[in-house]
Amino acid sequence: MVGPVLETEDLCIGIERNRQLSPVVRGVTFSLKQGEIFGLAGGSGAGKTLTACALSGLLARPARMSGGLIRVSGCEIRPESLRLWRGRRGRAVFMIFQDTASALNPVLAAGRQIREVLIEVRGMSRPEAMRETIRLLRAVGLRETHGNAYPFQLSGGMRQRVQIAIALSLSPKVIVADEPTTGLDPVTRTEILTLLRNLRDEQGISLIFISHDLRAVSYLADRMGIMHKGRLVETGTPAEIFDAPQHPCTKALISHLMALEGQNG
Ligand SMILES: Nc1ncnc2c1ncn2[C@@H]1O[C@H](COP(=O)(O)OP(=O)(O)OP(=O)(O)O)[C@@H](O)[C@H]1O
């Protein structure tokens, strides 16, 4: 049997304040299979983004991994071996952010940002990279001409598609998408979620999808986890979580969602 593409065991993250480490993520254990979408939901401050950053090797001071391990791409990352991980991170786990404005380079055309990754990281020749850039733009639902546009000339949804194309250009083992649809209008949000699902169905990408939007997570994920106060308090399929929530926090999130959806008709 093929093992998980990524797993964490007892992952702990702390925030350093006045030389003291306060725990903020505690004992998070989960695994992701090849071609699976795992959703991570939970309220504000639950520790979702810090977990995502740890998986992508992007934790920065004052936050640091303080315990447990992450296994990905044949690497076992522990707090004492983080340095090793930094050199390999983008190729193994790529993180997509909500804020495309800071994730994309504002002074480079979208296509060029994809092409440079292909040339510099994948070692492609220029003509090869140009062909692959066009293929990737189309794969994320953009046209070749969108490649000539600068980020500010594109809508939020289009910029998110460019970020996804850059992620695909690296062929990472896992893509971690942290609130990729927050701030987008409902139609664009659904389009981006559908794009991610199609990419999984067609290309077998493995995805960790993070959102406080329980409905979006349940729409996209094969399995999901609920984070609360730094702990992963419950995991299951969306149907299991919705039909028989166990943890009081999960129950509260679901009733809040139902109340909201009731109000909106
Ligand atoms: N750079 C930082 N400095 C100090 N505290 C931080 C820092 N980053 C995160 N924290 C704290 O760690 C906890 C977890 O934060 P995290 O951003 O992971 O939560 P989250 O679940 O992603 O929340 P949200 O949905 O609001 O983004 C919070 O209490 C937050 O205040």
Image (cartoon, rainbow, N blue to C red):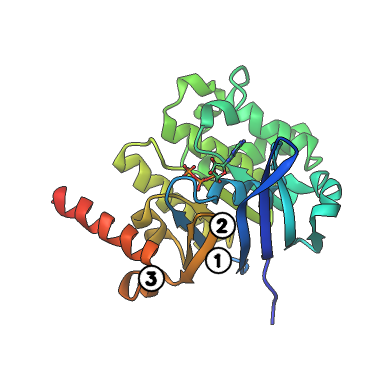
Near mark 3 (Cα within 10 A), the count class, few <14, some 14-19 or many ≥20, is many
Which percent across, then down, holds residue 8?
67, 64
Among all residues in the image, which is located at the extreme bottom? Answer: 1
Residue at 45% across, 56% down: 41
Residue position marked by numbered label 3 in the rendering: 241
Residue position marked by numbered label 2 in the rendering: 207
What amino acid type is highlighted by mark number 1? Glu
- SS category of the residue bearing label 2: strand
Near mark 1 (Cα within 10 A), the count class, few <14, some 14-19 or many ≥20, is many
Per the model, the C-alpha gap separating discs 1 and 3 is 17 Å
The reply to whether dot 2 and dot 1 touch (C-beta < 8 Å) is: yes
- Ligand 1 sits in which quadrant? top right
What amino acid type is highlighted by mark number 3? Ile
Q: Is residue 50 above or below residue 151?
A: below
The answer, for residue 218, to whether it is visible in the render is yes
What amino acid type is highlighted by mark number 2? Leu
Please tell me which residue lies in front, 140 or 4. 4
Per the model, the C-alpha gap separating discs 2 and 3 is 19 Å
Residue at 69% across, 82% down: 1
Look at discs 2 and 3 and give the one toward the viewer. Answer: 3
Which percent across, then down, holds residue 9?
69, 67
Residue position marked by numbered label 1 in the rendering: 36
Q: Which label is found at residue 121?
A: none
- SS category of the residue bearing label 1: loop
Per the model, the C-alpha gap separating discs 2 and 1 is 6 Å
Q: Is residue 26 above or below residue 62?
A: below
Q: Is mark 3 within 8 Å of ligand 1?
A: no
Look at discs 1 and 3 and give the one toward the viewer. Answer: 3
Residue at 70% across, 46% down: 21
- SS category of the residue bearing label 3: helix
Please tell me which residue lies in front, 243 or 251. 251
